[in-house]
Image (spheres, rainbow, N blue to C red):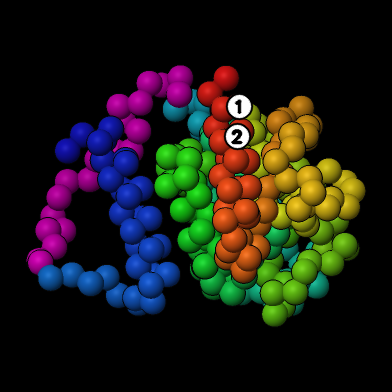
């Protein structure tokens, strides 16, 4: 197997494992013997050097932000968190999704959007937009630690975490940012955003196109045709912008 067809397979496998976890599996159901003796192939070995270099630059910048964040205790969310949820995906992605804050599953595993809302977001990205979550997007939140009991993050907590979000987005420099829900939209625009009214509208964040849409949790809770169509329409606009 060459490294170019290995990468999409690994991504697919990862998404499948996330899906199994969402279904409640704690082990991988496996009926055949695994061949663990296959030769390891270096990732990206067939990618042109210039592409590798660009990706490396962004991922280096992101790592620097994560290192600066460290084992953060800057706000009280650090008291009860299990893991900091920094973000995941492609540091060189054209598209970044910004959510509100980690829930219980995310806190447990240190990864964003892997619970129910995450499954919905993955569905929107992969089935709705025809993109690959890991390869085509980067996902993070306005606060990196779980607010206890999934309460809304407080103003001070958001403000304390905001410099890291800003640096994260500067490191990735995507073409488009999608703010998921009211808290993310309000944080990125620096004002209270009536999300139901303003979703589907374009804005600008530090010179980057910013689209506001409904949060996947809201969509799950109010699973109406109107809301599904709204998110679908918003993502269509995003795809059009990405293709420019
Ligand atoms: N909801 C969010 O806003 N972010 C997550 O990471 C998970 C659920």
Q: Quadrant of residue 198?
A: top right
Residue 5 visible in the picture? yes
Q: Distance between the Cα atoms at labels 1 and 2?
A: 5 Å
Give the answer, above or below, for where 69 lies relative to 116.
Answer: above
For the image, the number of numbered tags is 2
Magenta-span inclusion, residue 41: yes
Which residue is at the far front? 225
In front here: 126 or 134?
126
Quadrant holding the N terminus:
top left
Residues drawn in magenta: 32-51
Could you tell me if the residues under marks 1 and 2 are in contact, i.e. CB atoms within 8 Å? yes
Based on the picture, tell me whether residue 244 belongs to the magenta stretch.
Answer: no
- The structure residue drawn at horizontal position 77% and vertical position 69%, both measured from the top left corner, is 152
The residue carrying mark 2 is 238
Q: Nearer the viewer, residue 175 or 166?
A: 175
Determine which residue is flagged by label 1.
241
The residue closer to the viewer here, 189 or 112, is 189
Identify the residue shown where x is 38% and y is 21%: 48
Q: Is residue 27 above or below residue 181?
A: below
Count neighbours of disc 2 (C-alpha within 10 A) and say few if under 14, some if 14 to 19, many if 20 or more: many
């Amino acid at each position: 197997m060459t490294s170019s067809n290995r990468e999409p397979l690994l991504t697919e496998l990862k998404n499948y494992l996330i899906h199994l976890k969402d279904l409640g599996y704690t082990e991988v159901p496996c009926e055949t013997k695994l061949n663990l003796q296959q030769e390891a192939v270096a990732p990206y070995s067939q990618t042109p050097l210039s592409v590798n270099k660009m990706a490396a630059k962004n991922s280096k910048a992101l790592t620097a932000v994560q290192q600066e964040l460290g084992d953060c205790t800057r706000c009280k969310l650090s008291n009860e968190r299990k893991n900091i949820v920094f973000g995941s995906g492609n540091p060189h992605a054209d598209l970044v999704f910004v959510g509100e804050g980690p829930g219980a599953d995310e806190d447990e595993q240190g990864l964003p959007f892997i619970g129910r809302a995450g499954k919905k977001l993955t569905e929107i990205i992969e089935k709705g937009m025809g993109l690959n979550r890991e390869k085509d997007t980067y996902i993070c939140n306005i606060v990196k630690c779980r607010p206890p009991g999934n309460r809304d993050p407080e103003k001070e907590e958001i403000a304390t975490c905001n410099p890291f979000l800003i640096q994260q987005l500067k490191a990735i420099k995507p073409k488009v940012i999608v703010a998921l829900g009211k808290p993310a939209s309000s944080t990125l625009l620096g004002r209270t955003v009536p999300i139901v009214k303003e979703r589907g509208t374009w804005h600008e964040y530090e010179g980057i196109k910013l689209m506001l849409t409904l949060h996947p949790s809201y969509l799950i809770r109010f699973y109406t045709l109107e809301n599904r169509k709204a998110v679908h329409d918003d993502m269509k606009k995003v795809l059009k912008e990405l293709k420019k």
